[in-house]
């Protein structure tokens, strides 16, 4: 027979656990692009004509070259994003852990770039076709260690991107300085030891029309991230 004091203590513990569970944020995806307008995004250095929304799709004209950033920083997260180039040889990408500002005289930003190139880009620029399939690399002097080195870049170990007019899906996992990339349903690339572990997320305009849709994010618990590992807050 279980004594009454034990039942009271047991019930109290269950109650406390329930309260703690209720107070913890449930991990879940939420839209980073609402499919209707540019709420939550800030044009850094492009133009009002660069970005528009039609039928749930974010359309980037590609010009002028520059970026649009989230209105706040992110540390550990899973980002899902679908994209398609509308021109042969198109160039674009998404930046994670970005400073959210142009870097000195360059219109782009210091960050980790997740490359989005249309398949004909390599031929047009006399590069090997390995270059186009979801490369990861630090920009503007940022440092990181590539899993599959091609210089400072990390190249995908399997070619999975689709060509002009076809939708691609990236899943980008960013945790504690490590980035892993899934291209159309399979993880094929990564890097680690990023100099920065918290910053803005940016979409890139780089000369060619590209479409984005179904952009959503799951924020994960924070890590031990120092001020030096955090991008400066824009405006501070």
Image: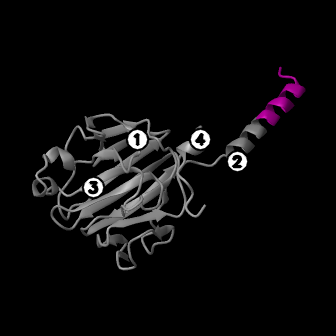
State whether residue 139 is above or below residue 32: above
Q: Residue at x 36, y 61 (%)?
A: 106
- Give the residue number, with chain letter if any, for mark 3: 116
Q: Earlier in the sequence, mark 2 or mark 3?
A: 2
Discs 4/3, front = 4
Q: Nearer the viewer, residue 106 or 215?
A: 106
Question: Cα distance, mark 4 to mark 3?
Answer: 30 Å
Q: Earlier in the sequence, mark 4 or mark 3?
A: 3
Q: Position of residue 210 (x, y in %)?
A: 27, 66
Q: Residue at x 27, y 48 (%)?
A: 134
The range drawn in magenta is 1-13
Q: Position of residue 195 (x, y in %)?
A: 46, 41
Circle 2 Cα neighbour tier, 10 Å, few/some/many (<14 / 14–19 / ≥20): few
Question: Cα distance, mark 2 to mark 4?
Answer: 26 Å
Corner quadrant of residue 143: top left
Circle 3 Cα neighbour tier, 10 Å, few/some/many (<14 / 14–19 / ≥20): many
Please tell me whether mark 1 sits on a helix, a strand or a loop.
loop
Q: Are marks 1 and 4 in contact (CB under 8 Å)?
A: no
Q: Which mark is residue 23?
A: 2
Residue 20 part of the magenta segment: no
Q: Position of residue 226 (x, y in %)?
A: 59, 41
- Give the residue number, with chain letter if any, for mark 4: 226
- Give the residue number, with chain letter if any, for mark 1: 143
Q: Which mark is residue 124?
A: none
101 vs 166, left or right, is right
């Amino acid at each position: 027979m279980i004594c009454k004091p034990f039942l009271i203590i047991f019930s109290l513990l269950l109650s406390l656990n329930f309260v703690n569970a209720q107070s913890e944020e449930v991990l879940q995806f939420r839209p980073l692009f609402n499919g209707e307008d540019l709420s939550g995004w800030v044009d850094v250095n492009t133009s009002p004509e660069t970005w528009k929304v039609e039928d749930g799709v974010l359309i980037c004209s590609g010009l002028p070259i520059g970026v649009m950033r989230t209105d706040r920083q992110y540390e550990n997260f899973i980002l899902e994003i679908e994209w398609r180039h509308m021109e042969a040889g198109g160039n674009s990408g998404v930046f994670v852990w970005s400073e959210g500002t142009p870097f000195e005289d360059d219109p782009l930003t210091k960050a980790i770039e997740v490359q989005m190139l249309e398949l004909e880009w390599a031929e047009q620029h006399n590069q090997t076709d390995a270059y186009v399939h979801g490369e990861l690399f630090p920009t503007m002097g940022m440092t990181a260690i590539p899993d599959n080195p091609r210089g400072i870049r990390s190249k995908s170990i399997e070619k999975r991107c689709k060509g002009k007019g076809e939708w691609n899906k990236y899943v980008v996992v960013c945790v504690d300085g490590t980035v892993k990339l899934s291209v159309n349903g399979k993880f094929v690339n990564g890097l680690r030891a990023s100099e920065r572990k918290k910053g803005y997320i940016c979409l890139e305009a780089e000369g060619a029309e590209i479409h984005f849709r179904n952009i959503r994010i799951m924020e994960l618990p924070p890590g031990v991230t120092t001020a030096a590992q955090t991008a400066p807050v824009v405006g501070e």
